[in-house]
Image: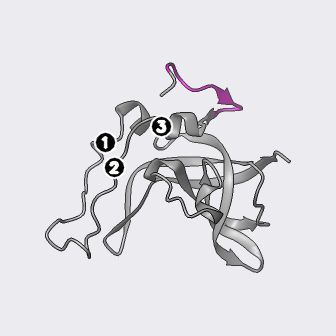
């Protein structure tokens, strides 16, 4: 992970995937496939410096993968370090994406880097017993599309 505090952009921490993905995170075993192992519930693999970003305003740039559309706009999506999960079947590491919520929605933009500004949450997130991510953002606004 890069040394030093992240730069700021108008009060938002500039958190690139060099920082977000800069540590090893091993996802727990599948709770259905391995009924003997309860899902991991702690965040011991997340470094303290990364946990300290939780609750702060941040700007993150990556590739959008829409997960929920309303009226043709993406209201929930992933911002990912790269596009490999989209078309090539490579499963990204748990710290290679951020789940973003933006109730107003934005037109889906794929194949080009895009920035989002909002409040970052850091910590294990579960849905139906499955770990779904360790980063989540309540976005305020869309930033620059780098075409």
Q: Residue at x 51, y 24 (%)?
A: 2
Residue at the extreme bottom of the image, as rendered: 71
Asked whether, in this view, residue 90 is left or right of residue 43, the answer is: right
Q: CA distance from mark 1 to mark 3?
A: 15 Å
Q: Which is more N-terminal, label 2 or label 1?
A: 2
**How far across and how far down the image is residue 8, in percent?**
65, 28
Q: Secondary structure at mark 2?
A: loop
Main secondary structure along the magenta-highlighted residues: loop
Q: CA distance from mark 1 to mark 2?
A: 8 Å
Task: Confirm or deny contact between disc 1 and disc 2 (CB under 8 A).
Answer: yes
Q: Nearer the viewer, mark 1 or mark 3?
A: 1
At 53% from the left edge and 47% from the top edge, which residue is drawn? 120
Q: Are marks 3 and 2 in contact (CB under 8 Å)?
A: no
Q: Nearer the viewer, residue 94 or 140?
A: 94
Q: Which residues are magenta?
A: 3-12
In x, y percent, where is residue 65? 65, 63
Percent position of residue 139, x then y: 64, 54
Most extreme residue toward the front is 88
Report the residue marked by disc 1.
Answer: 45
Residue bearing mark 2: 26
Q: Is residue 18 visible?
A: yes
Q: Earlier in the sequence, mark 1 or mark 3?
A: 1
Q: Residue extending furthest top? A: 4
| The disc label shown at residue 53, or none | 3
């Amino acid at each position: 992970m890069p040394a030093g505090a992240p730069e700021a952009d108008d009060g938002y921490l500039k958190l690139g995937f060099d920082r977000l993905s800069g540590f090893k995170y091993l996802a727990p075993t599948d709770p259905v496939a391995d009924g003997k192992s309860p899902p991991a519930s702690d965040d011991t693999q997340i470094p303290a410096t990364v946990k300290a970003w939780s609750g702060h305003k941040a700007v993150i740039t990556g590739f959008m993968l829409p997960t929920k559309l309303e009226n043709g706009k993406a209201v929930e999506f992933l911002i990912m370090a790269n596009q490999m999960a989209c078309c090539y079947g490579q499963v990204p590491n748990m710290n290679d994406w951020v789940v973003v919520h933006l109730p107003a929605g934005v037109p889906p933009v794929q194949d080009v880097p895009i920035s989002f500004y909002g409040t970052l949450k850091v910590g294990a997130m579960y849905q139906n017993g499955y770990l779904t991510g360790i980063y989540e953002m309540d976005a305020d606004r869309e930033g620059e599309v780098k075409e």
